[in-house]
Image (tube, rainbow, N blue to C red):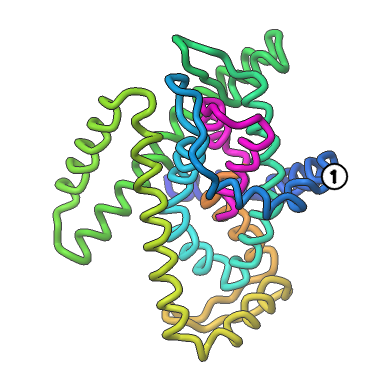
Amino acid sequence: MLQYLTRINQIAWGPGTLILFAGTGIFFLFVLKGRPWKKLSYALKLLFRPEISAKGQGMTSFQSAMTALGACMGTGNIVGVASAMVLGGPGALVWMCLSAMLGLPVIFSECILSIAYRKKYHGRYIGGPMYVMREGIGGRVGAVMAFAFALMTMGASFGVGNMTQSNSAGAALAFLWHIPAVWTGLGLMIALVLVFLMGQGGAGRVSAVLVPTASVGYLLCAVIVIVIHRARIGHGIYEMFQMAFSLKAVSGGIGGAVTVSAYDAMRWGVARGIFSNEAGLGSAPIAAAGATGLKSTDQAYLHMAGAFF
């Protein structure tokens, strides 16, 4: 079974996917005349603007962005980065950053489209890639694509979105404080039920509090670790870039020597980069469709800033 899954993984993240992802990012960047990069500082400022909302019509813009950012945070940013380094060497970090920059125009574009084709249901906006496919592409092709996307998103929400995250949390707490994983699972389940009982805007209100708090705490811990090991920063950066573009390089670390090529670094860097910022996966536009208070371009910039952050 493992060898079949490994084979599927190799095909899914083969050269075709890498070319398609990079090509899509470059295409949108060209069509948008570089605006996602040019307006990045403006997008980041939107994260700190006063709360804007059309009362009673869904999540605020900030809540929407934090909901999308909450989907990116967690296993993808921690386990995903670590596994990228093990499989692709330190050079994978360079490709993770490059893939994120190419992902910015993708996130901007999918959010714009999602807002354009969203629908109002019981006084609140709903939307996402499935609505873009059904309404934008239209016909039987659009309907089939929308159904397929919704079906696969449901599967991904159970797998990548829940099982991977809760398993990582359970394993970490079991290792650090010997808390049985089953208790962690039950605790997470109860917390999620309480959020669901808060209604459609519950996830947004909870995310608006938890995500900024977790982000600041995570970055603070990261800065402390970097400061402690500041003497190794120069060599670390050199090794990252050297292995990102070398035909074959060897890196030594606590896990032993890692021999990889530039292709390995690029493959795992892009794969784990998408897992980390979710560019093109469709989670950000679903959240963006439910937001009110900002014009569509600013809402798209806000979500783009969240992914960049």
Could you tell me which residue is drawn at 55 percent across and 29 percent down?
Answer: 293
Taking the spot 60% from the left edge, 26% from the top edge, the residue there is 129
Relative image position of residue 157 (x, y in whole percent): 42, 34
Q: Give the vertical position of 58 relative to 215 (above or below).
A: above
**Magenta stretch: helix, strand or loop mostly:** helix
- The three-letter amino acid code for the residue at tag 1 is Lys
The location of residue 285, given as percent across then percent down, is: 58, 32
Task: Name the residue: 40% across, 42% down.
Answer: 208
Instruction: Say which quadrant the N terminus sits in.
Output: top left
Confirm whether residue 7 shows in the render: no
Q: Is 287 in the magenta?
A: yes
Q: Is residue 240 above or below residue 186?
A: below
Q: Which residue is mark 1?
A: 33
| Residue at the image point whose x is 47% and y is 62% from the top | 83
Q: Image quadrant of residue 301? A: top right
Residue 35 highlighted magenta (yes or no): no
The percent position of residue 260, horizontal first and vertical second, equals: 62, 72
